[in-house]
Image (cartoon, grey):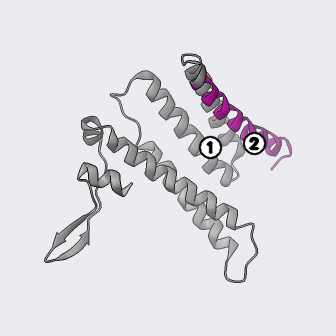
Amino acid sequence: MLRLRKQLGFTQHEVKARKAIFVKKQVTAELVKEDARYLQIQIFKCESDWAYAMMLKQRTTQKSAKFNPNRARVHSIKRFKRACQNVRQLAVDWLDNMSQLEIEAYQLQIEASYYIELQEYAKALDMLLKAKFIYEKVAATKDELDQAIYQERCSHIDTFIRLCSSQLSSGV
């Protein structure tokens, strides 16, 4: 991501009196309209937050004397929430319809993983079903190779749909 930021001249530091100072820069819709690589920055931020949350979630299952699994779970929920906040900023009006549908499905999928972590399975199931429907709709318009990719995404979503359904049927 740093390489992409350097290419765009969008680094988050300024040099003042021979000292680098951190200056947070937000990606705005105007910047994304100017160059689509700014959209990649937002996607990378969302993906890194989601991946870090998944890593923390995995570490909560490990037993270690130096590691508090309760704090890791709280921290992973915060990272899932931050990923959801970043993915909500991806909505760009000037993209074509298929790209907007893909972003919407991606957003639903990330938010569903957040709600699964919060154990709100009804909300997660609703979002997963919408995401699956959108991915199937997009796959119908693509060629065979892209259809296989979207079918893989749908099968991945099916796993989480079964999880939510079983949790709802067991009364959790």
Q: Is residue 140 left or right of residue 46?
A: right
Disc 1 residue crowd, few under 14, some 14–19, many 20+, Cα 10 Å: many
User: Could you say whether the residue bearing mark 2 is in a helix, strand or loop?
Assistant: helix
Q: Residue at x 56, y 18 (%)?
A: 143
Instruction: Compute the Cα span from label 1 to label 2.
Output: 10 Å
Instruction: State whether residue 130 appears in this view.
Output: no
The one of 4 and 54 positioned closer to us in this rendering:
4
In the image, residue 155 above or below residue 124: above
Instruction: State whether residue 47 appears in this view.
Output: yes
The one of 146 and 80 positioned closer to us in this rendering:
146
In the rendered image, residue 128, in percent from the top left (x then y), is placed at 65, 36
Q: Residue at x 65, y 41 (%)?
A: 123
Please give the label number shown on residue 164: 2
**Type of the residue with mark 2:** Cys
Q: Is residue 106 left or right of residue 90?
A: right
* Quadrant of residue 95 within the rendered picture: top left
The magenta segment: 146-172
Q: Residue at x 29, y 61 (%)?
A: 24
**Type of the residue with mark 1:** Ala
In the image, residue 59 above or below residue 123: below
In the rendered image, residue 151, in percent from the top left (x then y), is placed at 66, 28
Q: Which quarter shows the N terminus?
A: bottom left
In the image, residue 102 above or below residue 38: above
| Residue 104 in magenta stretch | no
- Tag 2 or tag 1, which sits nearer the N-term? 1
Please give the label number shown on residue 112: 1
In the rendered image, residue 158, in percent from the top left (x then y), is placed at 73, 35
| Residue 164 in magenta stretch | yes
Please give the label number shown on residue 9: none
Disc 2 residue crowd, few under 14, some 14–19, many 20+, Cα 10 Å: many
